[in-house]
Image (cartoon, rainbow, N blue to C red):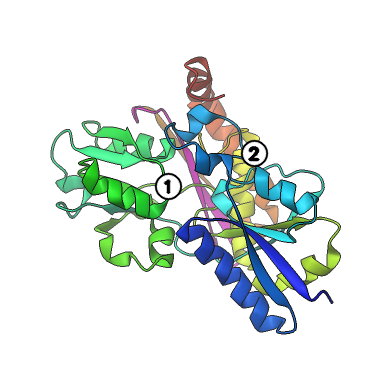
Amino acid sequence: MRDTIRIGTRSSALALWQANYVADTLRKHYPQCKVELVHHSTKGDRILEKPLAEIGGKGLFTEELEASMRDGSIDLAVHSLKDMPTELPEDLVLGAITERETPCDALVSPKYKTLDQLPQGAKVGTSSLRRQAQLLNRRPDLQISVLRGNVQTRLNKLETENFDAIVLAEAGLKRLGLESVITQTFTSDEIIPAVGQGALGIECRKDDTEMLDMLSVLHDENTMWATRGERSFLRQLEGGCQVPMGVHGTIYKGQLTLKAIIASLDGKNCFEGELSGPKEKADMLGRNLAKALYEEGGKAIIDDLVERGVLK
C-alpha cells in the first residue's frame, strides 16, 4: 500500500473543509499513510466579475485538478459534486460520493426573516440562474443581482453592496459553522436544489485500483443512487451548473423519487415533474424525466437562452 496520498483541492475555506474531511477520514482508516493537501486555483475561482453562465464551459472548477491527476502530482481531487460535469474524461472516474449534507438553499438577510418579508423590489444576490428563476417565480418584484466569490466573500458583500438578502447553499454554511446567519431554509419543494448539492465527489484516475479500493470508506450508496439520477437528468439536457434547472433525488425503501424543474430566467415559465422507480434504475429515471420536461416546454426555454447568449 502507498505511503502518501496527495489530495487536490481549491483554496477557499469551504473547499479546504471538504478536503480536510476526506483527509481525516483516510487518515483514520489508513494510519500508515501520510495524507497531504495540494492547493489549486481554477478558472471558476479566478474569473469573479462574470456570471458562471457567461464564462461558459462545464469544467470551470475541475479542469486544473484533473490535469494534476493526469501528471501524477495528486492522487485524487475533492469537489462539490454540483460543480462536476456530468461527463468525465475517459481516464478519470468518480471514486466515491460522500453521504449528503442538506441539499437545500438558505436565505441570509440582516433585516428580514423570510423571503415573503422582503420589501417590494428588494435586492437579492445569487450566483445561480436556477435560484434566480425560482426566486422570481415566487417573487417577480425582486431585483436579482449577480453574487460571485467564496462563502465569506458573499457574506461580506451582503453588507458592503447593500443587498437585502442573499441565497447560498445551506450545506456550505453548516460546514463552515455559519448556521447562525441563516434566516430561512427553503425546503426542496420551495426551491428545487442543484444536481448533487450537498454531496462531495471524489475523483481519481480510473486505472488507480488501489486508490479506488481505499476510497470505499468514504462512499455512500444511497447518495450515489440519488445523485446518479440527478446527474442523468442533467446529462440528458446537456446542461452544466449554469442552466436554470434543479433536480432532487430522495430514496425511501429502495425507491428513488426525482423531482425536477426547468424554468425561464424571469421565473414566468416553470415546468416541473416527478418520477419514481427502483433506485437501480436511476439513469433511466433521470433520462425519462428530462425528456418529459424538455418536451413539455424546457426545449423552448433552453433554445431561448442559447439564442440570447446566456448559455454557450
Query: How far separated are the C-alphas under marks 1 and 2?
Result: 17 Å
From the top left corner, tell me how far across and down residue 53 is, in percent: 50, 31
Q: Secondary structure at mark 2?
A: helix
From the top left corner, tell me how far across and down residue 28 is, in percent: 64, 83
- Residue where numbered disc 1 is placed: 192
* Picture quarter with the C terminus: top right
Q: Is residue 190 above or below residue 35?
A: above
Which of the two discs, 1 and 2, labels the residue nearer the N terminus?
1
Q: Secondary structure at mark 1?
A: loop
Q: Is residue 204 above or below residue 99?
A: above
- Image point (66%, 52%), residue name: 282
Is residue 191 shown left or right of residue 46? left
* Picture quarter with the N terminus: bottom right
Nearer the observer, 81 or 235:
81
For the record, the magenta segment spans 244-268
Kindly identify the amino acid type of the residue bearing the numbered disc 2. Arg
Tell me the chief SS of the magenta region: strand
